[in-house]
Amino acid sequence: MSFEDMLSSPLLPDGVRRAVETMRANVGHRWSVTQLAAVAELSPRTLQRQFLRFLGKSPQAVWQEIGLEQARYELLRGAGGGRVSDVALRCGFAHLGRFSTDYHRRYRETPSSTLKRQARFTKELASRLTMLRRSRDRPAVAFGVFTACADHRALADNLSNDLATALTHAGLSVTREARFARYRMQAEIRQSGAHKRLLIQLTDQESGRQLWAHRSEDVLSGGSACHERLASRIVARLRPALRHAEIEHAQSKPDGALSPHDLALRAMPGVLSLDAEGNARALDLLERALERDPGSAFATALAAWAYAQRIVYHLSADPMLEKARGLELARKAQGFAGDSTALAVLGSALTLLEEFDGAARVVGQALAIDGGCAWAWSRSGWLDVYRGDAESAIERFKIALDLAPQDSLAFNSMAGMGCAHFKAGKYAEAAHWQQRAVNEHPSAVWMHRTLCPAYLLTGARHAASRSLAALRAGHPDLTVSQVRLCMPPLPQTYRDLVVGALSELGLPA
């Protein structure tokens, strides 16, 4: 449970709440149980007992987790002037070695790796091109006055401009006039003691329903580059909620009122499902959309991706026919202008169709338009996997997961992390990430195709057999030769290990 969840729980006693809030307000201070008990107005023994009962941890363990969460937050923002030691000390960790060990245990990477990744993210943002599409299909967001006291007015204006720019790069229309928009974004900077918080919410103007909310701590720290990163991250986390709202809006329309773009939006959940039923449903809708608008970049890219999925996820009895149709659409889509989402989708199609140069080009264009596009970062990670660069792939997948951990395709980045670790020979890590992906998306049984070999190569034969059983339950007629034919374009040594493991465990030839 996150500390936000802990603090919002109605079952949390007031004394424990006061102690946790005090620790959060003074992260760098090393609190003794006696000091915290005085804050909580409890005896030290009672405080410890209540922490264990309601939070499952001792006060010292909770303090450490608060410190690690704050350190993670600062490192993801690129704070600390490039020095992990400064962040560690500021968050209450006097021993850098122990801090690095605890951080790695919790986040499965070193603090320096997190900080270096943010340097790469910042470089992408700084090098973005201004290639923005204009289309009547762009969702419109009304972004009104940014609420802040006089002391923070200049900061609010700067953040407002950065957010408007990030929204525009993400393919949205931004207006000050609420009557021209379906959605409304409101933001304010609120001060609580020594802390300044940025609060943002997105609402549907027609229903008044809140679609999404965000809170950022200590927004006054850092300069303009830090605020630009913050704006890109906020918009990246907003995008799944807005995408879901757009799909709901298309689904609520009468069939006779559907535009080609509405049909493509209706198809999107099926494409993102990565399973047979969703794929078939999506392709029917997309073919209808393309009949009415053959020049739709979004619908064409989605259809190309859906056909490519039919090959690598064992959804087709005639993979070569599906590949020909997918290539036809993907090559056509490359001639259309599209936003970062359409380009990232097209990159996914081209990657699975083994058109790596074209995929790298359109994914690069997506990141040039919107450096905060999690789908483009994830797809660039998959390109690195297929090209054999495991280290770069892991870095890119982590950026995607940092940007949009709640996105519907986050599980695909986890699967990619597993494949990258597999390529690097780290089979236990590969199994960990692949299993996380399967847990997030159980219907994507094709992931067992690489999870099963990862378990076998770690010596976990029982887990490998269980994984193979799940694969065969989803694809009863699957054979080793079909796996070999339809496997994604992974390096040959990787493919050989997968095929060898599946054969050893009894998948029919």
Image: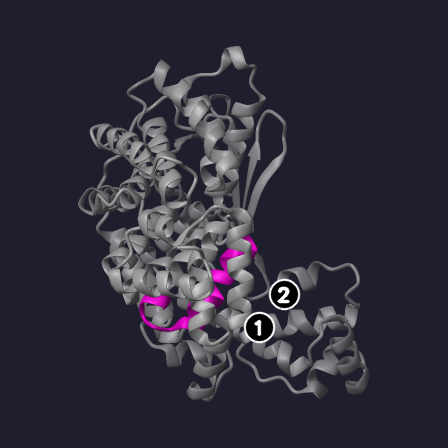
- The residue pinned by badge 1 equals 66
Amino acid type, mark 2: Phe
Task: Identify the element where label 2 is drawn.
Answer: helix
Residue name at image x 49 percent, y 27 percent: 266
Question: Residue 220: which numbered mark, if any?
Answer: none
Q: Residue furthest left?
A: 357
- CA distance separating discs 2 and 1: 8 Å
User: Residue 358 at x, y = what percent?
Assistant: 20, 42
Q: Residue furthest front?
A: 509
402 in relation to 429, above or below: above
The image quarter containing residue 113 is bottom left
Residue name at image x 47 percent, y 72 percent: 71
285 in relation to 456, above or below: above
Q: Quadrant of the N terminus?
A: bottom right
- The residue pinned by badge 2 equals 3
User: Residue 89 at x, y = what percent?
Assistant: 45, 82
Residue 426 showing in the rendered view = yes
Q: Residue furthest top?
A: 256
Of callouts 2 and 1, which one flags the residue occurring earlier in the amino acid sequence? 2
Which range of residues does the magenta coloring cover? Answer: 422-440
> Does the magenta-highlighted stretch encompass residue 434?
yes
User: Residue 267 at x, y = what percent?
Assistant: 47, 29
Q: Nearer the viewer, residue 22 or 391?
A: 391
280 in relation to 106, above or below: above
Amino acid type, mark 1: Ile
> Does the magenta-highlighted stretch encompass residue 318?
no
Mark 1 crowd level (few <14, some 14–19, many ≥20, 10 Å Cα): many
Residue name at image x 58 percent, y 22 percent: 252
Circle 2/circle 1 CB separation < 8 Å = yes
Q: Dominant secondary structure of the magenta stretch?
A: helix
